[in-house]
Amino acid sequence: MRYIARVKVSLKPGHSDPEGETTREALLELNYPVDSVRVGKLYEILLEASSIDDAQMKVEEICKRLLANPVKDDYKYEIKEASNE
Amino acid sequence: MRCEEIRVCIVRVGGTNCDAETKRSFEDLGVKAFVYHFNEVLQGIDLLDYHILVLPGGFAYGDYVRAGVIFAKNFMARIGKKIMRFVDEGRPMLGICNGFQILVESGLLPGINGVSEHPEAALATNIPIGYRCGWVYLRHENNGKCVFTRLIPKGRVLRIPISHAEGRFLLPTVRGEEILNKLLENDQIVLRYSNENGEYAEGRYPENPNGSFYDIAGICNPEGTVFGLMPHPERAYYGWQLPDWTRMGKPPKYGDGKLIFESVVQYVIRKF
């Protein structure tokens, strides 16, 4: 089975986000009443797995091993069966 | 071991820079230095034929995902056992700039309890944000553990340039102080950002150019043989690389970066 995982990696709460802060300042310059901006990365991963549980196990491992540094990053994901295109 | 018998292995991938400068710095000291693409290492270069292993600066694999992480995970997966043996035998390993990021992402640094499965520190986006290239002052903090700085007296101020966008050294928020104390206890702190007089930057920009915790610019493992630093010593090897050498009248022959290369060569001569 093919599954699609949408993984979002963002900085842990409380960690400085200079990219988000710079974006917030830019939005204020453009007259948007923005209180805060946090920047993250979105990965869309198409993968083969035997079941949704297997897919989840693989994605969890991918996040821990490569996509997130536990010192500063949080991650969350959703996994769905990939539709046949 | 005689100086001319020492062999240095410098590993590059797409996006590596300053490998040529690193090679030239080592060669100036009379040792043999070789630059290999990582694919050549995988295809049969035996790391144990070399005495010093260097991961130079740059932007390995485009710094995608996070600076250094793709190369870090790749080499630990492919040649991790060989690297571990290299390090366990007390052979020194140096990570400059991107190389430091790679050592941290691979768990080789800080390595308080040996190589960690997941990183125990991070080199995060600079604060203030942006790529920064310029000369900084570094105070040598080590009490003699780090084999890359043994020729440098404690407290001595070095002038070496940085060139990075992700150099903000971070420890986990929850156990940060505890880990810092451990690093101090183990003599793992090697370089801290300071001003010209050796007064710590205390987080202030521009002396601390990236917002690093505790002004940390370079650390070593508990054995002192694996060393990572954000500044580029190979860009401060010769006197004519200094930004103000034309104003000095007669330029010095060498810059402060030489001491780092010289220290590790001296260590290898004595050790092997």
Image (cartoon, coloured by chain):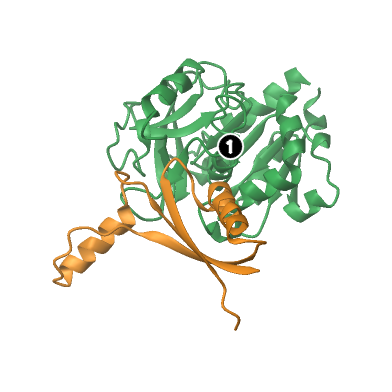
Q: In the image, residue B14 lies at what x, y percent?
A: 65, 60
Q: In the image, residue B81 lies at what x, y percent?
A: 75, 37
What number of labels is visible? 1
Q: Which chain is orange?
A: A
Q: Tell me the chain of label 1.
A: B
Q: Quadrant of residue B116?
A: top right
From the viewer's side, name the closer residue of B121 and B30. B121
Left or right for B215, reference B91: left
Residue at 81% from the left image edge and 24% from the top image edge? B2
Residue at 52% from the left image edge and 41% from the top image edge? B236
Q: Quadrant of residue B94?
A: top right
Q: Quadrant of the N terminus of chain A?
A: bottom right
> Can residue B217 be seen by looking at this rendering?
yes
Q: Which chain is green?
A: B
Left or right for B244, reference B235: left
Q: Quadrant of the C terminus of chain A?
A: bottom right
Q: In the image, residue B109 lies at what x, y percent?
A: 56, 33
Residue at 72% from the left image edge and 40% from the top image edge? B80
> Can residue B245 be seen by looking at this rendering?
no
Tag 1: amino acid: Gly
From the viewer's side, name the closer residue of B126 and B243. B126
Q: Is residue B128 above or below residue A33?
A: above
Task: Identify the residue under disc 1.
Answer: B107
Q: Residue furthest right?
A: B44
Q: In the image, residue B127 lies at what x, y percent?
A: 32, 48
Label 1 neighbourhood size at 10 Å, few (<14), some (14-19), many (20+)?
many
- Label 1: state its secondary structure: loop
Q: Residue furthest bottom?
A: A85
Residue at 69% from the left image edge and 28% from the top image edge? B265
